[in-house]
């Protein structure tokens, strides 16, 4: 009987996608708490700020997981990644066109066939990382611990200064391949040179990073200071607190040891959740639904409806992704047969 692979990091992959869903039902849908809201509704504002900063690490976690396992460049892998992205882009776009919800124009066609709009920025950034993985892996193999550590320190110091304090174009608050490369190398470093610390230390560091970000934005209004600039900086993926928090969460989960076929099954379709709910035809519906739930429910009822929304998105995404997997396997097998004829 085949043994089920370890599910610790696969569970984190699912949690990271839940975090990304959470980001898009909070500040993106409702807006960030302003100075007046924080002062008049401090508890609700603190919870929303804490939730946002707990979820902001989700994207970094996703990239760090790739670095932890390592990307092994294969033609099939890159074709499968592009096929999945295009499959979801088109399978969603076509019904919206048929029902008249979306116009057929150059911009929408480009958005569907070329993943043109910014909502799919992750696809292009990750594609660059995937292509560069062989070179990054070679660099890691040729470097010792000291060299790699020195490189990472310099990389993240420069990234922090450039992204937060300058207007350098190639640093876009973490929405860029260069930041992904740094995260990939960081995860590889910790995979190769593990620290034997108690797993709960990493969980503590994650919570501490979230709390520090939250307090940095929560406290200024009580001293008559606007928190707008601070929120903008702390929500950057390049914010050191978000990178340290994401890394700590990854290291915590790598210390766990359990196996679950259900977790592994869901994890294989996690990226489909992003492709579905951030599609330009769907994202407004998702955001407007989240805003409706916030405006019409409160307390436990609100959290319950949000959970239902998340589960629904996961279920639809997994169902569509199963179809995608069948289609890809069929087409790839046909290609392999023809290639060997």
Image (cartoon, rainbow, N blue to C red):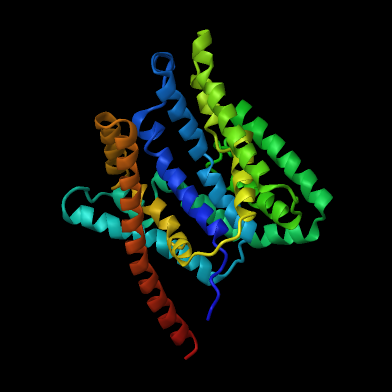
Q: Quadrant of residue 164?
A: top right
What residue appears at the point 48 percent right and 20 percent down from the top-left corner?
A: 228
Residue that protrudes farthest toward the bottom in the picture: 341
Measured as percent of width and height from the top left, residue 188 is found at 69, 55
Which is more toward the observer, 126 or 32? 32
Position of 314 compared to 241: left or right? left
Residue at far left of view: 99
Asked whether, in this view, residue 129 is left or right of residue 34, the answer is right
Asked if residue 87 can be seen in this view, the reply is yes
Q: Does 212 appear above or below 73?
A: above
Give the residue at x 61% y 33%: 208
Residue at (54% x, 61% y) in the render: 7
Q: Position of residue 115 (x, y in %)?
A: 39, 52
Q: Foreground residue, 273 or 97?
A: 273
Instruction: Tell me: residue 179, above or below residue 136.
Output: above
The image shows residue 126 at horizontal and vertical percentages of 53, 53
Q: Is residue 237 above or below residue 228?
A: below
Q: How many marks?
A: 0
- Residue at (39% x, 34% y) in the render: 26
Residue 72 sits above or below residue 35 on the image: below
59, 208: nearer the viewer? 208
Q: Can residue 166 be seen here?
A: no
Question: Which of the 4 image quadrants contains residue 168?
Answer: top right
The percent position of residue 141, horizontal first and vertical second, equals 76, 61
Judged left or right of residue 141, residue 249 is left
């Amino acid at each position: 009987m085949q043994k089920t692979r370890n599910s610790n990091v696969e569970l984190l992959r699912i949690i990271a996608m839940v975090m990304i869903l959470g980001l898009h039902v909070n500040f993106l849908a409702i807006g960030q708490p302003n100075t007046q809201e924080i002062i008049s509704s401090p508890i609700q504002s603190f919870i929303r700020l804490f939730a946002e900063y707990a979820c902001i690490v989700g994207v970094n976690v996703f990239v760090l997981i790739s670095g932890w396992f390592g990307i092994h460049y294969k033609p099939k892998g890159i074709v499968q990644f592009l096929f999945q992205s295009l499959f979801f882009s088109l399978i969603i776009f076509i019904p919206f066109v048929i029902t008249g919800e979306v116009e057929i124009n150059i911009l929408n066609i480009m958005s569907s066939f070329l993943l043109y709009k910014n909502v799919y920025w992750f696809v292009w950034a990750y594609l660059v990382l995937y292509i560069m993985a062989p070179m990054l892996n070679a660099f890691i193999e040729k470097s010792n611990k000291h060299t790699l550590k020195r490189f990472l320190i310099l990389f993240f110091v420069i990234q922090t200064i450039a992204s937060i304090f300058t207007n350098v174009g190639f640093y876009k608050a973490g929405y860029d391949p260069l930041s992904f490369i740094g995260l990939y190398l960081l995860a590889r470093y910790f995979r190769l040179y593990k620290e034997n610390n108690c797993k709960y230390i990493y969980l503590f560091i994650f919570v501490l990073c979230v709390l520090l970000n939250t307090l940095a934005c929560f406290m200024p209004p009580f001293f008559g200071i606007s928190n707008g600039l601070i929120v903008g900086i702390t929500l950057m993926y390049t914010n050191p607190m978000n990178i340290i928090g994401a890394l700590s969460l990854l290291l915590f989960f790598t210390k766990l040891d359990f196996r679950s076929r259900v977790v592994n099954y869901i994890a294989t379709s996690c990226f489909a959740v992003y492709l579905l709910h951030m599609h330009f035809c769907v994202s407004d519906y998702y955001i407007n639904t989240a805003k409706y739930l916030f405006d019409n429910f409160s307390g436990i009822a609100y959290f319950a409806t949000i959970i239902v929304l998340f589960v629904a998105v996961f279920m639809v995404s997994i169902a569509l992704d199963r179809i995608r997997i069948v289609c890809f396997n069929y087409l790839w097998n046909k290609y392999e047969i023809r290639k060997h004829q």
